[in-house]
Amino acid sequence: DAGITQSPRHKVTETGTPVTLRCHQTENHRYMYWYRQDPGHGLRLIHYSYGVKDTDKGEVSDGYSVSRSKTEDFLLTLESATSSQTSVYFCAIRNEQFFGPGTRLTVL
Amino acid sequence: AQSVTQPDIHITVSEGASLELRCNYSYGATPYLFWYVQSPGQGLQLLLKYFSGDTLVQGIKGFEAEFKRSQSSFNLRKPSVHWSDAAEYFCAVPISSGSARQLTFGSGTQLTVLP
C-alpha cells in the first residue's frame, strides 16, 4: 500500500474556529489532492498541488486554503469553519491512484 | 463538460450472483476511466482503469469493466459476488483543468450483498 496518512482522523470543532488537516506521503509523488465526500455527491476536488509551493483550486475551493512547503506534506486549512464544511476529507496522490484513510470533520 | 453518471444509487444482489454496475460518461474524445471501491469507514481503492486499447479491462478482486464507445458506458462486472464485495463503488473520469489532471466522480452506487 502507498504510504499516505491523514491527521487527525476525527475532529469536532465549533463554527468560526480555524482547522488544519494534514496529509503526509512517503512516496515522493509530485501530485497531491484534497477531496471532500458528502452523501449524494461522490467526491469533489477542493485543491490540488503539482509541486512544492505549487497549488491550484478545484471544484469546491471556497472557504479552504492549502499549503505545500515540502513534498511529503499537503495541508488543508479551513480559516473559519462553517457547518457546511462538515464532511469526510480525503487526500490522494499520484493522479488519484492512491487515497488516504480520510478525516471525518464535524463543525458544530 | 466531461462527467460521469452512475444511474443506480443502490443495488442488492445475492452472494454468488453476477453483478453489473453502470457508469455512463460524457466526454468529447476517448476518455480515461476509473472504477474505485470504498468499504465502510475507509478510503477509496482503485479497482481498475481504462486508458486505451483493449476495451475489456481486468482489475483487482475479480472485477472487470468494458468500455463501449457506442453506448458511452464503462460498466463494472463481476461474475460471482462475495459478501466482502459489499461497499460503495465510484466511477470517475479525469479532466484537464488548470495545471493538472483532476478526477470527476460519479455519485456512487451502494452495493448490498445478501447471504
Image: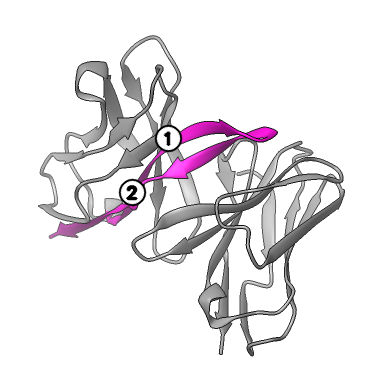
Q: How is the image coloured?
A: one colour
Q: Is residue B52 magenta?
A: no
In this view, the residue in front, A70 or A108, is: A108
- Residue B69: % across, % down: 26, 18
- Residue B17: % across, % down: 10, 43
Please state the extent of the stretch shown in magenta in the rendering: B86-115
Residue that badge 2 annotates = B89
Question: Would residue B31 appear left or right of A57 to someone viewing this image?
Answer: left
Q: Chain of mark 1?
A: B
Residue B5 drawn above or below residue B72: below
- The 10 Å Cα crowd at callout 2, few under 14, some 14 to 19, many 20 or more, is many
What element does badge 2 sit on?
strand
Residue that badge 1 annotates = B1
Q: Residue at x 20, y 59 (%)?
A: B112
Residue B111 drawn above or below residue B36: below
Q: Residue at x 40, y 17 (%)?
A: B30
